[in-house]
Image: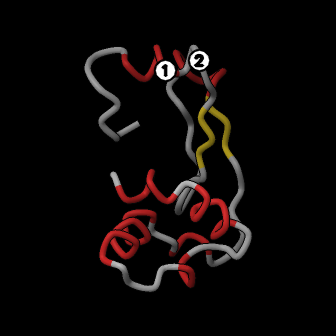
Amino acid sequence: MNWDYGSGDSIEKQLKVFELLVASRGGHYEPPPPIRNRVRSIALPAGIDEISSTEVRRRIRAGEPWRDLVPGPVAPLIEERMELWLSV
């Protein structure tokens, strides 16, 4: 849990409302005990480790091609909520 989720126990508060799916890159992720019951790991198909959401967002904001960086079924989901990607 290395991302900035806000101050203090912010991630614990968020996980009272929703669960978090974690797709581990390069190994298994074991969540800390206080949040273990709200965090689930999902397996990724081979080759997916190379996808970078940061690069996808950068390309969308720059108006550059990005669809080749995401699995086919994901592109329409991104396009439906493009405003979310442009504001990040």
| Element at label 2 | loop
When the figure is inspected, residue 48 is found, relative to residue 40, above or below; the finding is: below
**Colour basis:** secondary structure
Q: CA distance from mark 2 to mark 1?
A: 6 Å
Outermost residue to the left:
7
| Element at label 1 | helix
Measured from the top left, where is residue 42 in percent x and y? 70, 49
Residue underneath mark 1: 14
The residue under the point 34% across, 40% down is 2
Residue 78 sits in which quadrant? Answer: bottom right
The residue under the point 45% across, 68% down is 52
When the figure is inspected, residue 83 is found, relative to residue 46, above or below; the finding is: above
- Tell me the kind of residue under disc 1: Gln
Residue 35 sits in which quadrant? Answer: top right
Tell me the quarter of the image containing the N terminus.
top left
The residue under the point 53% across, 63% down is 26
Residue underneath mark 2: 17
- Tell me the kind of residue under disc 2: Val
Q: How many other residues sit within 10 Å of disc 2, few (<14), some (14-19) or many (≥20)?
A: few
Check contact, mark 2 vs mark 1: CB within 8 A.
yes
The residue under the point 36% across, 14% down is 9
Q: Identify which residue, 16 or 83, lies in the foreground.
A: 83
Q: Which mark is residue 59?
A: none
